[in-house]
Amino acid sequence: MFPDEIVTPRLRLRALSREVVDPLDAYEQFAASRSDTIEEETEFVTWNPHETPKETLDFLEQAEEGHESGENAIYAVFPRDGEDGAGEFAGTAGFNPEWDKRRAVFGMWLRKEFWGRGYSGERAAAFFAAVFDVLDLDVALAYAMPENEASCRAIEKYTDRFGGQEDGLFPNEAVDADGTPRDVRGWSVTREQWETATGGDYDAEFRWEGRE
């Protein structure tokens, strides 16, 4: 159902799995005991740095199961040739379809060295096409904690590009890994808005592979 691989001008997104990212290599980026930047990278997300390799293994297995079952699409992000750090595991990006509501929620986590490159907007453009054109859903949503100013700016920029808008502040909408409620700002783009902004044509800027 979900594309196995999505290629954009600067990124290659591959369905996250143990084959795509070795669990021990991923643990080096996800664990507080191994990464000097993970605490900063997870400040505004709802998961904590991993404590054991088993936690990383479980995460990868869950991603595989979600992709196969059509419940959740999570991709490993790799910069393409010509980018600084080409071929390195740069982070994860995904969308969570809410099939009964005909909508999908976007998310992205990047390692610090890949911040500030505009990758969020680039993968969002590809995800809009996948959600609206491939999966035939009606609305795409993105959320960010108000304190995460960089993510708020990025989401605002790409939703505006595709005709969307900010929907407001949602108190206690997110829950931290430790159970603490957190407020979030939310944005949305409808399929009609996306089609108006793009003409339903994404100019072959990207392609997806492996969808049956």
Image (cartoon, rainbow, N blue to C red):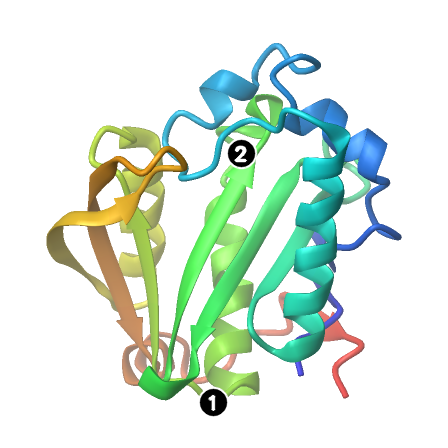
- The image position of residue 176, as x and y in percent, is 34, 37
Q: In which quarter of the image is residue 194?
A: bottom left
Q: In this view, does 149 lie to the left or right of 169?
A: right
Task: Tell me the residue at 61%/29% (across/down).
Answer: 50
- The image position of residue 12, as x and y in percent, is 73, 53
Check whether the beta carbons of the residues at disc 2 and disc 1 lie within 8 A of each other. no
The vertical placement of 48 against 1, above or below, is above
Specify whether residue 174 is in view.
yes
Amino acid on which the number 2 mark rests in the picture:
Arg
Q: Residues within 10 Å of mark 2 (few under 14, many from 20)?
A: few
Distance in Å between CA atoms under marks 2 and 1: 29 Å
Closer to the eye: label 2 or 1: 1
Q: Quadrant of residue 142?
A: bottom left
Per the rendering, the mark at residue 136 is 1
User: Quick one: 81 or 15, which is closer to the camera?
Assistant: 15
Task: Tell me the residue at 11%/54% (across/down).
Answer: 168
Per the rendering, the mark at residue 117 is 2
Q: Quadrant of the N terminus?
A: bottom right
Task: Tell me the residue at 56%/20% (across/down).
Answer: 38
